[in-house]
Image (cartoon, helix red, strand yellow):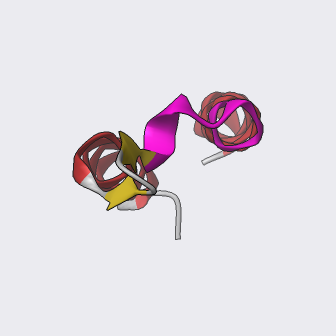
Amino acid sequence: MYRGSPAFLDMTVQYVQERKQFGKPVGVNQAKKHHLADTGKAIEFARPMV
């Protein structure tokens, strides 16, 4: 499960930077930024456990 996680996170970050909602990229939403940051931390935390 961990193996593909960093790639999926990278694809998600790229998507939220490109996807527009109400004329702005979805990635400018602070809640999305926090969620992606938490996901990145979880992936890094899991790395030594694999």
Number of numbered callouts drawn: 0
Between residue 32 and residue 10, name the one nearer to us. Answer: 32
Instruction: Classify residue 40 as left or right of residue 10.
Output: right
Query: Horizontal and vertical percent for residue 26?
Result: 47, 48
Instruction: Classify residue 13 as left or right of residue 39.
Output: left
Tell me, yes or no, whether the highlighted magenta stretch contains residue 5.
Answer: no
Magenta region? 26-33
Instruction: Classify residue 26 as left or right of residue 15.
Output: right
Asked where in the image residue 48 lies, by quadrant, the reply is top right
Relative vertical location of residue 39 with respect to residue 8 in this rendering, above or below: above
Query: Horizontal and vertical percent for residue 3?
Result: 39, 58
Relative vertical location of residue 46 with respect to residue 11 in this rendering, above or below: above
User: Residue at (45%, 56%) from the top-left corner?
Assistant: 22
Q: Residue furthest front?
A: 22
Instruction: Classify residue 15 as left or right of residue 12.
Output: left
Between residue 22 and residue 37, name the one nearer to us. Answer: 22
Between residue 39 and residue 25, name the one nearer to us. Answer: 25
User: Residue at (64%, 32%) from the top-left corner?
Assistant: 33
- Main SS category, magenta section: helix
User: Residue at (22%, 47%) from the top-left corner?
Assistant: 18
Query: Horizontal and vertical percent for residue 16?
Result: 38, 49
User: Residue at (47%, 38%) from the top-left corner?
Assistant: 27
Relative vertical location of residue 4 with respect to residue 18 in this rendering, above or below: below
Q: Residue furthest bottom?
A: 1
